[in-house]
Amino acid sequence: MIRFSERVRAPVAPKSPFRHGAAAAPAPSHSEPNPRRPRASRVLGLCAFCFARANPLPRIRRTVRGSKPTEEVKVDKGLWMACLAAIPGSFQYGFGLSVINVPQAAVCRSLGLAQTSLTWSSLVAVLSPSGLLGAWLAPSAVRRLGLVTALCGTSIFFLISGALFPFAAQAAAQSQLSLATALFASGRVMAGLGAGAATVFVPLYLGRIAPLQLRGAIGNLHQVAIVLGLLVAQLAGAALPWPRTLALAALFGALQLLLMPWLREVPEETTDSAPIGGFGALGSSELRRPMAMAVALMALQQYCGINGVWYYSTSFFTEAGLPNPLAGTLVSSAIFMVATLVAVPLIEKAGRRSLLLRGQTSAAIALSILTASLCAKAAGGLGFTDGLLNGATLMSVIAFVVSFAISLGPIPWQIANEIFPLRCRAEAQCVIASLCEIFSASVALGFPVLQRILGARLAFLPSVVVLLLGYLYVRKNLPETKNREVKDILSDFNRRR
């Protein structure tokens, strides 16, 4: 943890990522007999060994090639308060994604809808097109209003959204179901507009105020806030009636307004001398390869299997035979939150490229073990106990979630904020955020089709293929971006042609 008044200096010799270093384990004694372990222990040990070999945590001790030595930087309280004031929009994005997952049965009863009806599916899915619209309007808002004013303006959408849901519940209680449905849909649209714009404003703002030496850690706060929103939405949905749960968006919007005075003004966009800016610059020969990399990373993030885990986690754990699938989902979300927090300092200690490659490897191994355990359970156990297979299923899901949280979750957003010059960074973030919505919606529609074609036990095999192809593409084309200026990164991209 970095204290507010400390000065951050990179050590000459990289230190262990563990506090005070990791103590060496004592050598095993050979004086006692070593009985053969039972099959369950051998299988779980093999799974742990495979994951540990790919896990980036113990392998970040060497320096990152291509990065500059870290210079002394003053970390003050105002910087962290500005970050705290900026990330409520990211929190609202994660909150809106999962806020109706847990209470959906109660909402459908109130609105008189079936959970399989087209109307309900539209109410759930309307967040994506409205978020897409909000993302496309974001660059224009930055040009006309300024980044700080535009960022604060997203809170208005969340205030309106949170206020509409209690009115929808009141109309439903009075049997005005059409009005209740319309109010509910309007609330989802307003939440989507604000969240879509926030996915552009927040990474852009964090990248503008972050010192070069803390750019990765501060940029990762966007992903931390999204994951926190996911977790809070699930906990609130399990503890509160649905009108109060959805109305929390207004409370968090008001909190964002209260934090406005701590937002720092960002420098004007006068540092770039190139005459072409905006969307036109993204098609230039200099930025074509960085744009392809940013799009590929966002596709990799969405198609790696994480959305399948979140969208269908309850039914997935039910088929795995776990007695309380909702508890399994909440545990996975809590672990996701902890791992995302761990990634904040880790992304500065390790290089973006190295962490991304090792995270993809870990995720591919975890999904392979998950598929194998589900197939073994479907085949009657193949000599393994149900408890062992259920444990392997849960542990592989957790390993996958951790791998995603420290690599594919934050790094695509961070890379997109580091490889584009200032004159077109807002437009690049707009394209990336829009593609995130499109890819996410395609997963929501396509994953059930994969389940029907391949069966739930093999539905994650395409994700393993995506991870392996993504590993090869990233290894060949992505330069290291840690502690490097944009012009140096672009030169490295051009040398890789």
Image (tube, rainbow, N blue to C red):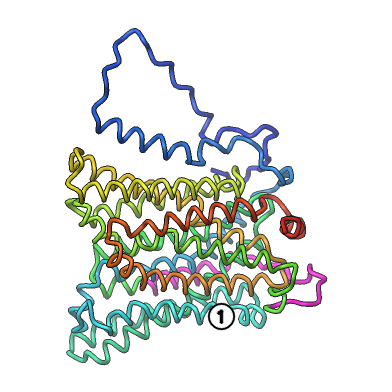
Magenta highlight on residue 141: no
Q: Which residues are magenta?
A: 249-278
Residue 167 vertical placement versus 484 (above, below): below
Measuring 48% from the left and 55% from the top, which residue is drawn there? 467
Measuring 50% from the left and 72% from the top, which residue is drawn there? 257
How many marks on residues?
1
Residue 331 vertical placement versus 286 (above, below): above
Residue 213 vertical placement versus 160 (above, below): above
Q: Residue furthest top?
A: 31
Horizontal side of 42 relative to 114 (left or right) equals right
Q: Residues within 10 Å of mark 1 (few under 14, many from 20)?
A: many
For the C terminus, the image quarter is bottom right
Residue 232: x, y in percent? 35, 61
Instruction: Give the residue at mark 1.
Output: 136
Give the amino acid type for the residue marked by disc 1 in the picture: Trp
Q: Helix, strand or loop at disc 1?
A: helix
**246 or 403: nearer the eye?**
403
Residue 273: x, y in percent? 82, 71
Measuring 63% from the left and 51% from the top, which residue is drawn there? 214
**6 or 117: nearer the eye?**
117
Measuring 75% from the left and 67% from the top, which residue is drawn there? 286
Residue 199: x, y in percent? 52, 70
**177 or 428: nearer the eye?**
428
**299 or 74: nearer the eye?**
299
